[in-house]
Structures are given as C-alpha cells and as structure tokens.
Amino acid sequence: MMSDGEYVYDEATGEWVEAGAATDAASGAAADDGAVVVRDSVGNVLADGDQVTLIKDLTVKGAGQTLKRGTLIKSIRLTGDAQEIDCRYEGIKGLVLRAEFVRKR
C-alpha cells in the first residue's frame, strides 16, 4: 500500500522512494566519509590525479595568460571545496580552477 507522503525518483536504484529515505541514502556515503564530492561540468566525479580538459577559454588573473579551450590539465588535486580544484600548468604557479569549467578526460 502507498501512503500519502512525498516520493522522489532515486537514480542510483531506479526506484521511487519516500523523500526522507532518499535524502538519507544520498547523503549517507558522503556524510560517513566527511569527503566532499567534486563533479565536473557534465557531472562526472573527479578524484585526485585525474586529467581534465578546459571547456572554455579562461583568463588567468595575475599571470597575463589565457588558457584556451581544450587545454589538458594533468594530475589535479582536490581542495576541501566542492567547486575548486588545484592544478599545475607550466608557467602558472598556484593555479586553482572551478570545476564547472573542466571536463574529465
């Protein structure tokens, strides 16, 4: 029997579940680890050491340089922020990019 509560679609299991149960299950893994999940522009989960490609031209403040669309950034490091990744690129020291401007390779 169905109750009159709210239901949401859980993409991981492909089933409709009660709203309270879905939020508990979705936040359970991240809450247990205390880790921040970082996703790129298309929703792929990023991890330390991944390679990413820029999806748009970015002007780097203080470096007087523009990183072009399609530039490959190797060996990224995750910060504590869900929207920022730390990376290295030749000639630019301390480069931090927003995850919304990269795509996992």
Image: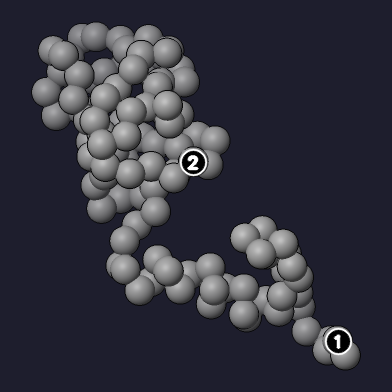
Instruction: Return the residue at label 2.
Output: 44
Q: In the rendered image, is residue 80 in sight?
A: yes
Does 67 sit above or below residue 45? above
Instruction: Return the residue at label 1.
Output: 2
Residue at 76% across, 78% down? 6
Question: Label 2: how many residues lie within 10 Å, few (<14), some (14-19) or many (20+)?
Answer: few
| Element carrying mark 1 | loop
Question: Label 1: how many residues lie within 10 Å, few (<14), some (14-19) or many (20+)?
Answer: few
Residue situated furthest right in the rendering: 1
Amino acid type at circle 1 is: Met
Q: Quadrant of residue 71?
A: top left
Amino acid type at circle 2 is: Asn
Quadrant of the image for the C terminus?
Answer: top left
Quadrant of the image for the N terminus?
Answer: bottom right
Does 12 sit above or below residue 76? below
Q: Position of residue 25 (x, y in %)?
A: 54, 73
Q: Position of residue 37 (x, y in %)?
A: 39, 53
Please indicate whether residue 49 sits to the left or right of residue 9 in the image.
left
Residue at 29% across, 22% down? 73
Q: Which mark is residue 55?
A: none
Residue at 62% across, 80% down? 21
Image coloring type: one colour
